[in-house]
Image (cartoon, rainbow, N blue to C red):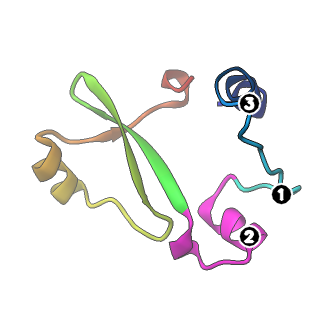
Amino acid sequence: MSEASVRAYFAAHAPDVSIIDQGVSTATVMEAAAALGVEPARIAKTLSLRVGDQVILVCARGDARLSNGKAKAALGAKPRMLGAHEVE
């Protein structure tokens, strides 16, 4: 998702929500934590996963790791990260 598409979405659907540009990259948990002056655990990250035919989003704290075994047990199938060609 590009910055332009996010700005366009908010302009159309939530014009009262302002976007705060940090002026530096926040693409990774470590970059976001550094930009905001917080520890990585205070950053929320979203994982885009394919589980069978479904695509799901998992929101987790920044320093959390996905346990494939636990995720498979909880979701009923092995989750796979979405490829770049699958993300809009």
- Point out the frontmost of discs 1 and 3: 3
Q: Which mark is residue 46?
A: none
Dividing the picture into quarters, in which one does residue 38 lie?
bottom right
Please give the range of residues in magenta: 27-43
Q: Is residue 6 above or below residue 25?
A: above
Name the residue located 74 percent from the left edge and 30 percent from the top edge: 15
Q: CA distance from mark 1 to mark 3?
A: 20 Å
**Could you tell which of marks 1 and 3 lies nearer the N-terminus?**
3
Give the label on residue 36, or none.
Answer: 2
Image point 41% across, 68% down: which residue? 64
Query: Which type of secondary structure does the marked residue at label 3 adopt?
Result: loop
The reply, left or right, for residue 24 in relation to residue 69 is right
Q: Find out whether the residues at labels 2 and 3 contact each other: C-beta distance under 8 Å.
A: no
Residue 15 marker: 3
Sequence-wise, which precedes: disc 2 or disc 3?
A: 3
Frontmost residue, 12 versus 8: 12
- Mark 1 secondary-structure assignment: loop
- The amino acid type of the residue labelled 1 equals Gln
In space, the residues marked 2 and 1 are separated at their CA atoms by 8 Å
Could you tell whether 39 is left or right of 71 in the image?
right
Disc 3 residue type (three-letter): Pro
The quadrant in which the N terminus is found is top right
Foreground of the two, 86 or 23: 23
How many labels were placed on the picture? 3
| Coordinates of residue 42 in the picture (x, y in percent) | 55, 72
Residue 20 percent coordinates (x, y) = 80, 51
Q: Secondary structure at mark 2?
A: helix
